[in-house]
Image (tube, helix red, strand yellow):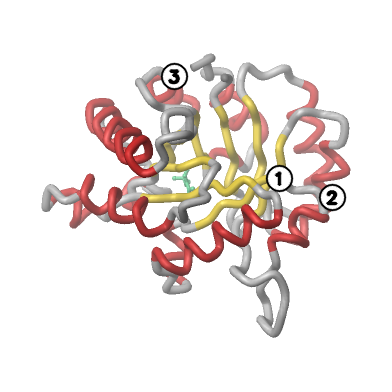
């Protein structure tokens, strides 16, 4: 399987920029499976721009319910209908900004799966938790309670203190955490846990991507800031390998 490089645009991007960005991605053969997760309003434009390519499209959140009185929220079914195949869930910014608990994330994962979307479920410890030696326990608890029993999808390990800071864990720390996540997934999901892709996220950029993507159990990367420029995103993807 090719490593997966997913771009999380967060609350960035414009409709005017979609054609050039998508064109740049389409123009360059990549050793990775590419996924772009833009803000909701850009999904239809990206779906058109990626049509006929193998570049994946994802949203950054969905509601746990299929429809209803939830002003401002978006249903997984609609995300699927406009052409996305993935949805990022449980990102630490949503856990913090919208008080999303593991139980809330699990409800969203269920909704995504019911709609036919592949969830990319984010887990990761704070700096305080890492300093206290609790990082693996924190992540294991997030996995246990954020992933429902029907879970099939991707997991992204994103240490909160590495997101947007330019700091990354040491290779040894990434290796240890990915091994811990793999063990937890195998225990929780005996049929699929061994093959669930585990992405690394947090200040991934062209200069560190080769070293990170070479580590065991790293199935790819979830990229925030460095995904906004197509050239930078493609430079990260150029380091991908078959795992
Ligand atoms: C993210 O928030 O998913 C992320 C990985 O951000 P950045 O690459 O900017 O650290």
Q: Which mark is residue 210?
A: 3
Coordinates of residue 55 in the picture (x, y in percent): 73, 32
Give the farthest residue toward the left. 132
Dot 1 or dot 2: first in sequence order is 2
Give the farthest residue toward the front. 191
Asked whether the viewer can see residue 110, the reply is yes
Q: Residue at x 77, y 55 (%)?
A: 42
Q: Residue at x 76, y 28 (%)?
A: 54
Residue, disc 2:
45
Left/right of residue 136 with respect to residue 52 in the rendered view: left
Q: Which mark is residue 118?
A: none
Circles 1, 2 touching at the beta carbon (< 8 Å): no
Coordinates of residue 179 in the picture (x, y in percent): 29, 30
Q: Residue at x 71, y 37 (%)?
A: 56
Left/right of residue 6 with respect to residue 134 in the rendered view: right
Q: Residue at x 55, y 57 (%)?
A: 109
Say what secondary structure mark 1 lies in: loop
Q: Nearer the viewer, mark 1 or mark 2?
A: 1
Establish if 26 lies above or below 144.
Answer: above
Q: Nearer the viewer, residue 225 or 107?
A: 107
Alpha carbon separation for disc pair 1 and 3: 27 Å
Dot 1 or dot 3: first in sequence order is 1
Label 1 CA crowd tier, 10 Å (few <14, some 14–19, many 20+):
many
Q: Nearer the viewer, mark 1 or mark 3?
A: 1
Q: Is mark 2 within 8 Å of ligand 1?
A: no
Q: Quadrant of residue 228?
A: top right
Asked whether the viewer can see residue 202, the reply is no
Coordinates of residue 230 in the picture (x, y in percent): 67, 34
Q: Quadrant of residue 156?
A: top left
Q: Which mark is residue 85?
A: 1
Coordinates of residue 241 in the picture (x, y in percent): 52, 15
Establish if 78 lies above or below 43.
Answer: below
């Amino acid at each position: 399987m090719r490593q997966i490089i997913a771009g999380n645009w967060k609350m960035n991007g414009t409709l005017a920029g979609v054609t050039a960005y998508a064109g740049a991605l389409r123009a360059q053969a990549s050793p990775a499976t590419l996924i772009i997760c833009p803000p909701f309003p850009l999904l239809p434009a990206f779906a058109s721009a990626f049509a006929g390519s193998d570049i994946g499209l994802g949203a950054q959140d969905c509601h746990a319910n299929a429809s209803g009185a939830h002003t401002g929220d978006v249903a997984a079914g609609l995300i699927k209908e406009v052409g996305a195949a993935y949805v990022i869930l449980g990102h630490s910014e949503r856990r913090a900004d919208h008080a999303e608990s593991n139980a809330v994330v699990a409800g969203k994962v269920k909704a995504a799966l019911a709609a036919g979307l592949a969830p990319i479920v984010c887990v990761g410890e704070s700096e305080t938790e890492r300093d206290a030696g609790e990082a693996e326990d924190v992540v294991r608890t997030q996995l246990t309670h954020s992933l429902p029993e029907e879970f099939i999808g991707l997991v992204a390990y994103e240490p909160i203190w590495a997101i947007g800071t330019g700091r990354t864990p040491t290779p040894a720390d990434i290796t240890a955490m990915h091994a811990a996540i793999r063990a937890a997934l195998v225990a929780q999901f005996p049929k699929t846990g061994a093959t669930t892709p585990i992405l690394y996220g947090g200040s991934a950029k062209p200069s560190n991507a080769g070293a990170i993507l070479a580590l065991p159990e790293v199935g790819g990367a979830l990229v925030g800031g460095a995904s906004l420029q197509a050239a930078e995103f493609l430079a990260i993807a150029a380091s991908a390998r078959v795992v």
